[in-house]
Amino acid sequence: MAINDDELEITILQKYIDQYKLVGVENASKCARELDMREIIKEITGKTGQDLELEASIWHNRLAPRTPGQSAGVLRPCSDSTIMNTTHKYHARAFTDPINNQPAPAWDRIRDLQSKQEKPKNYSNSTQITMVLD
């Protein structure tokens, strides 16, 4: 069964949210809340080798871009400077930021994608109401 990009993104984000909930915010280790994008993509798509590396790189850059001082993505990349370019290169985590305009970006993004997937109602068979103004 083929999966479109929106469905893939929802599934990816849901896995990160599940990890966030599993570990909890009380755990001081941000790395404990992280998942490796390669593992997520492999689990969802079955891709391996170079195809997996390419797909993981695309999705990681899209969802958890590395912007110095801030993350404009819906996920945050690993922030441990000692491992973020090696073993945690593809690691990211869901996050909440109550003082930001977008306090829960991964959750909000899922909601946006799901609303796009909802089919518009078909009003062609409904009764037409005509309003008469005096």
Image (cartoon, rainbow, N blue to C red):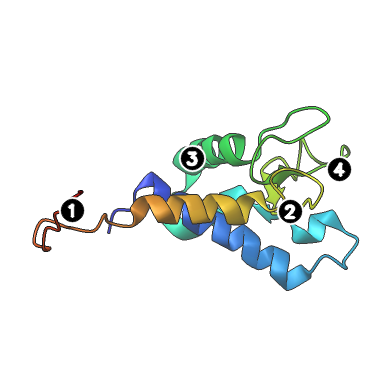
Image: 12 above or below 51: below
Which circle marks residue 55 in the picture? Answer: 3
Look at the image and tell me in which quarter the N terminus lies.
bottom left
Dot 2 or dot 3: first in sequence order is 3
Distance of label 4 from label 3 (alpha carbons): 23 Å
User: In this image, 1 relative to 46: left or right?
Assistant: left
Q: Which residue is mark 4?
A: 80
Mark 1 against mark 2, which lies toward the viewer? 1
Which circle marks residue 95 in the picture? Answer: 2
Secondary structure type for disc 1: loop
Badge 3: residue crowd in 10 Å (few <14, some 14–19, many ≥20): some
Dot 1 or dot 3: first in sequence order is 3
The amino acid on which the numbered mark 1 sits, given as a three-letter code, is Met
Give the percent coordinates (x, y) of residue 116.
38, 50
Which circle marks residue 131 in the picture? Answer: 1
The amino acid on which the numbered mark 3 sits, given as a three-letter code, is Glu
